[in-house]
């Protein structure tokens, strides 16, 4: 394994700036790693080698020429990145891991992709996910499961299992994810990586294929808190193409991460959410969580218990609001203007029948399940009882957060109640899969930001610790997250990810 | 083509037994530069699918952004319809699958329209005024245009395939919905026409729509129901879709009243449904059943934030409102001192603006009316053009008139000069100069012509001497002939009188 791939994005950026390595070398090292292990992992749906190397060569040439243009390069210029295949890109296919978009090429770039291009980060390719981001395991991709680098029989989380696995397996130092109910944070937790769901509106959603518009948020995936801070500063900011994007940029994220890394948390009030501990949380998860609390306390944080009584309704409300929006957002996939078109095998070729045949063939079971749920929840006569009630719960959850943030600067909980489960375990029990997101969903319902940082191992699998902050206070997450990261690494004497076992590609190759 | 087989009841007879209840949904296409939710051009008549962005095609990942000008135009319409303007309102998704709707939902307003609770006073031809209550005016986006190929009806049923043009998809619309209109009785068809005409006039006057019904800028869905004279509950309604001319609105309402009456007379029930209007036969035929429970699964549009209207913004917009057309007509009629019929003719001829501008440029109201309703109207008709397309300006009329008053030319020559103006020969003065059309009022030349005429017609001279002044007219022909029509008739008359010592 080339040591270049072990570097964090920030470390690699420093070496690029210092002229110790070239971006082409860095990109090639990651492409080699993808070639080596992705047969086993299936983190990538598309590898964008040619363009990535071209962008890297361009950055190298600018650096070599020196002068103002080199000075003006973004700090992350030349550092490769992987993109969740829910985000549209020119020049690379975008599938949302669905048959529906097989072979579709977007004629436009998402706003975050425009920013990545402008900053000259070579894009390594597009990563796997649950179809249209619907799932918590990446088992619901139309293009095969992604495996957890820590244990190839385990799920990498979802929906952003591809981005998390790519970063955890050193295929990429950075990646983009999207988080609707935990799709960045839960994969981060179960792969021992860092993931951030920014405040709703902090990052433009333009070009992220919508699952549930009021919940979706693009965010960074990385191995260190500092890397995520740099990446969020790069992709964040107001976008006139997204009416829900915040009018002002959130600043000071990198500075907050750097401040947190000193390990000093004096004066920070950390709220433990009573409802997100105990029953339903695996013993090992709970143990790692408690150890983290002790470290935070030792670093000067004041630990308080807060109660969010309405969080128990969050999962129920989420599974009404999300599918309702899904049923409408996914209506456009009808075979008329783009993507797959499937003709009925027999009978007349009317528009209704072509649309129906296309949707029957193009969508997987989990997507259909949610479209049907949402269509039902919005139907006349049921709207008030389902969608309407769920929106009221949403308000109650926001109030719970408001009250909790009166008592605490940040809130903390395990990110996921369990470590990565076995592939196929929840095939016939979608509700069990849904429970994985019980701790992450409240943040999406309230629009507040959340981060997951590695908290240790249980059963040789990673456990994630989640911090939540008030809306717009993403900087607090980076401070607390970087502090916990530093404290744990100091205690362990190494980073968690450095303990990940070697990936045995041969075992999967034989199975396949 | 229609397959109409319905029985009808004579209109007057129907109205003896039933009271009609009307309701209108008028869609107004706004003439903003760009579309409701994208920056694609809002333009008519371009090549298919050229005025589209990823947003208009509903491509994966796109998001809408509200066009602020469209919101302002909508507020202007609301204010002109005497509506309340919502302090805060939002958009909703109306979900249904149809290939002219790229996202398979229409972004519209549902529970909270931008404007609500207004009214419009509609004056019928004889001056009777009906108040039509406006329930709401809300913003939405237009759909694309489907062209069904093959098949005989031009409808989707029976077509071999269909073409879709998304240029119109996303064009801003304001839908104006009335409350049920009762009490119009036999005047219902007339009121229907007058109401739609008034709405069209208002949006045209505001400058927020091109307001051309033939292009679909203003489209009307007409709801009609009948209730027995002694009933207190509305009957079942039908909604006749896309009645797209003023005359058609009148005819469609009349037809539905006659048809409903026949159905009700037979003891049958009206089916709540949409009806298609057929201009060729002036009939409606059954469309699709429609119930109040059509399930569009409306829910608030999560991709857009609410629109908040401040008092300052609304008042600024109110300040931009032009004078309402009805009030303006009342004022102009009084200022110009026209008789009822004169004024009505002017309105119907559509030359109110021209006359107003001509008066403002210095002509009297009588002179302005004489020209715009007379010679200009005649020339427009002869050329089969709109008066506004002739190239005659208020300044032309003022100039022509001052040439007449200054006795440079007479009426007859002025009419010729006007034709030359239309032909593009220049301004009236230039034409008079170039073509040497100035009247002869040089007494020497005129005197000689008069002498010659009098010498040639001694009997006429005797009659004049005998007090028959109208006989002077007989001398006019030869005098005009001698001066090639350029004699000033008034001056000729004076010279004759002088010569005869009268």
Image: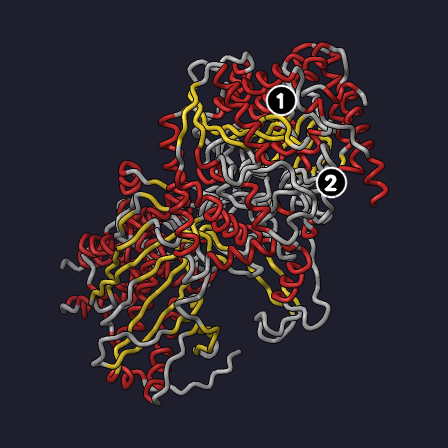
Residue B228 seen from this side: yes
Tell me residue A166's x, y (percent).
Answer: 71, 32
The total number of labels drawn is 2
Q: Look at the image and tell me in which quarter the N terminus of chain A lies.
A: top right
Q: Which of the 4 image quarters holds residue B471?
A: bottom left
Q: Nearer the viewer, residue B163 or B336?
A: B163
What residue sits right under mark 1 in the picture? A224
For marks 1 and 2 on the same chain, the one whose residue lies earlier in the sequence: 2
Q: Nearer the viewer, residue B264 or A252?
A: A252
**Which of the two discs, 1 and 2, sits closer to the camera?**
2
Q: Residue at x 85, y 36 (%)?
A: A506
What residue sits right under mark 2 in the picture? A153
Chain of the residue that carries numbered disc 1 in the rendered image: A
Secondary structure category for the residue under label 1: loop
Q: Residue at x 70, y 22 (%)?
A: A79
Compared with B232, A306 (above or below) is above
Tell me residue A376's x, y (percent).
Answer: 49, 59
Secondary structure category for the residue under label 2: loop
Tell me residue A229's x, y (percent).
Answer: 57, 22
Q: Nearer the viewer, residue B75 or B329?
A: B75
Chain of the residue that carries numbered disc 2 in the rendered image: A
Q: Nearer the viewer, residue B299 or A365?
A: A365
Q: Residue at x 63, y 71 (%)?
A: B159
* Mark 1 vs mark 2, CA separation in Å: 25 Å
Compared with A364, B37 (above or below) is above
State how the image is colored. secondary structure
Tell me residue B360's x, y (percent).
Answer: 27, 45
């Amino acid at each position: 394994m080339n040591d270049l791939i072990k570097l964090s994005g920030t470390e690699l950026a420093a070496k690029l700036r210092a002229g110790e390595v070239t971006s082409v070398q860095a990109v090639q090292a990651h492409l080699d790693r993808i070639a080596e292990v992705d047969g086993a992992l299936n983190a990538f749906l598309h590898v964008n080698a040619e363009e990535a190397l071209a962008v890297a060569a361009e950055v190298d040439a600018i650096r070599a020429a020196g002068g103002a243009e080199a000075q003006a390069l973004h700090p992350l210029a030349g550092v490769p990145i992987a993109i969740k295949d829910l985000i549209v890109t020119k020049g690379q296919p975008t599938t949302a891991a669905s048959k529906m978009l097989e072979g579709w090429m977007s004629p436009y770039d998402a706003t975050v992709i425009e920013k990545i291009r402008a900053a000259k980060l070579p894009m390594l390719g597009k990563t796997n996910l649950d179809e249209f981001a619907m799932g918590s395991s990446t088992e619901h991709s139309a293009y095969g499961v992604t495996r957890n680098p820590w244990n190839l029989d385990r799920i990498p989380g979802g929906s952003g299992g591809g981005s998390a696995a790519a970063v955890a397996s050193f295929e990429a130092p950075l990646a983009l994810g999207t988080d609707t109910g935990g799709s960045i944070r839960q994969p981060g937790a179960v792969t021992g990586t860092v993931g951030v769901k920014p405040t709703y509106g902090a990052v433009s959603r333009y070009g992220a294929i919508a699952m549930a518009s009021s919940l979706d948020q693009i965010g960074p995936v990385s191995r260190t808190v500092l890397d995520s801070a740099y990446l969020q500063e790069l992709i964040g900011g107001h976008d006139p193409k997204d009416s829900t994007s915040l009018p002002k940029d959130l600043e000071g994220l990198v500075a907050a991460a750097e401040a947190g890394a000193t390990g000093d948390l004096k004066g920070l009030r950390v709220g433990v959410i009573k409802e997100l501990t105990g029953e339903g949380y695996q013993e090992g998860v709970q143990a790692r969580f408690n150890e983290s609390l002790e470290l935070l306390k030792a670093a000067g944080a004041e630990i308080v218990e807060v109660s969010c009584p309405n969080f128990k309704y969050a999962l129920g409300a989420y599974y009404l609001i999300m599918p309702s929006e899904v049923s409408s957002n996914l209506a456009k996939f009808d075979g008329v203007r783009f993507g797959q078109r499937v003709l009925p095998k027999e009978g007349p070729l009317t528009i209704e029948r072509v649309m129906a045949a296309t949707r029957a063939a193009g969508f997987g079971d989990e997507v259909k399940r949610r479209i049907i749920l949402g269509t039902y929840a919005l139907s006349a006569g049921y709207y008030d009882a389902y969608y309407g009630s769920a929106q009221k719960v949403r308000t109650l959850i926001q109030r719970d957060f408001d009250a909790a943030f009166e008592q605490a600067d940040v809130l903390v909980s395990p990110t996921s109640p369990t470590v990565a489960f076995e592939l196929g375990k929840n095939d016939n029990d979608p509700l069990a899969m849904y429970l994985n997101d019980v701790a992450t969903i409240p943040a999406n319902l309230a629009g507040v930001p959340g981060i997951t940082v590695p908290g240790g191992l249980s059963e040789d699998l990673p456990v994630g610790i989640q911090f939540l902050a008030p809306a717009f206070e993403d900087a607090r997450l980076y401070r607390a997250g970087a502090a916990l990261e530093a404290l744990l690494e100091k205690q362990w004497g190494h980073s968690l990810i450095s303990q990940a076992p070697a990936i045995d590609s041969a075992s999967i190759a034989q199975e396949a | 083509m229609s397959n109409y087989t319905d029985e009808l009841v004579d209109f007057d007879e129907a109205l003896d037994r039933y009271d009609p209840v009307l309701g209108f949904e008028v869609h107004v296409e706004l003439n903003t530069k760009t579309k409701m939710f994208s920056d694609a051009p809002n333009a008519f008549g371009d090549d298919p699918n050229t005025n589209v962005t990823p947003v208009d095609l509903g491509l994966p990942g796109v998001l809408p952004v509200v066009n602020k000008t469209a919101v302002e135009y909508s507020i202007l319409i609301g204010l002109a319809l005497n509506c309340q303007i919502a302090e805060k309102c939002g958009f909703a998704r109306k979900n249904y699958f149809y290939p002219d709707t790229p996202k398979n939902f229409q972004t519209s307003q549902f529970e909270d329209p931008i404007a609500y609770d207004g009214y419009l006073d509609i004056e019928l031809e004889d001056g009777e005024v009906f108040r039509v209550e406006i329930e709401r005016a809300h913003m939405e986006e237009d759909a694309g245009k489907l062209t069904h190929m093959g098949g005989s009806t031009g409808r989707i049923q029976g077509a071999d395939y269909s073409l879709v043009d998304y240029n119109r998809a996303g064009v801003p619309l304001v839908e104006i919905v009335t409350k049920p209109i009762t009490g119009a009785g036999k005047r219902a068809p007339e009121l229907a026409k007058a109401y739609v005409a008034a709405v069209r006039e208002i949006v045209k006057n505001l400058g927020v729509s091109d307001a051309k019904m033939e292009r679909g800028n203003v489209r009307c869905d007409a709801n009609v129901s009948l209730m027995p004279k002694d009933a207190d509950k509305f009957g079942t309604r039908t909604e006749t879709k896309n009645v797209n001319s003023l005359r058609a609105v009148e005819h469609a309402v009349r037809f539905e009243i006659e048809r409903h009456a026949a159905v009700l007379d037979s003891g049958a029930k009206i089916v709540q449904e949409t009806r298609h209007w057929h201009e060729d036969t002036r009939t409606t035929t059954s469309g699709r059943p429609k119930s109040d429970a059509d399930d569009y699964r409306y829910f608030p549009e999560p991709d857009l934030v609410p629109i908040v209207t401040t008092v300052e913004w609304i008042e600024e917009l109110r300040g931009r409102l032009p004078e309402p057309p009805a009030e303006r007509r009342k004022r102009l009629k009084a200022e110009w001192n026209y008789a009822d019929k004169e004024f009505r003719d002017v309105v119907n001829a559509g030359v109110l603006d021209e006359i107003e501008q001509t008066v403002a440029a210095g002509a009297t109201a009588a002179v302005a009316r004489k020209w715009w309703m007379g010679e200009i109207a005649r020339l427009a008709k002869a050329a089969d053009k709109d008066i506004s397309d002739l190239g005659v300006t208020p300044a032309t009329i003022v100039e022509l008139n001052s040439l007449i008053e200054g006795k440079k030319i007479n009426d007859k020559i002025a009419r010729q000069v006007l034709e030359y103006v239309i032909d593009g020969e220049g301004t009236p003065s230039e034409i008079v100069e170039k073509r040497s059309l100035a009247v002869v009022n040089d007494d020497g030349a005129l005197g000689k012509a008069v002498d010659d005429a009098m010498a040639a017609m001694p009997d006429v001279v005797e009659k004049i001497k005998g007090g028959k002044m109208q006989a002077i007219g007989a001398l006019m022909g030869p005098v005009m002939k001698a001066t090639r029509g350029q004699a000033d008739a008034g001056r000729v008359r004076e010279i004759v009188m002088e010569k005869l010592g009268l």
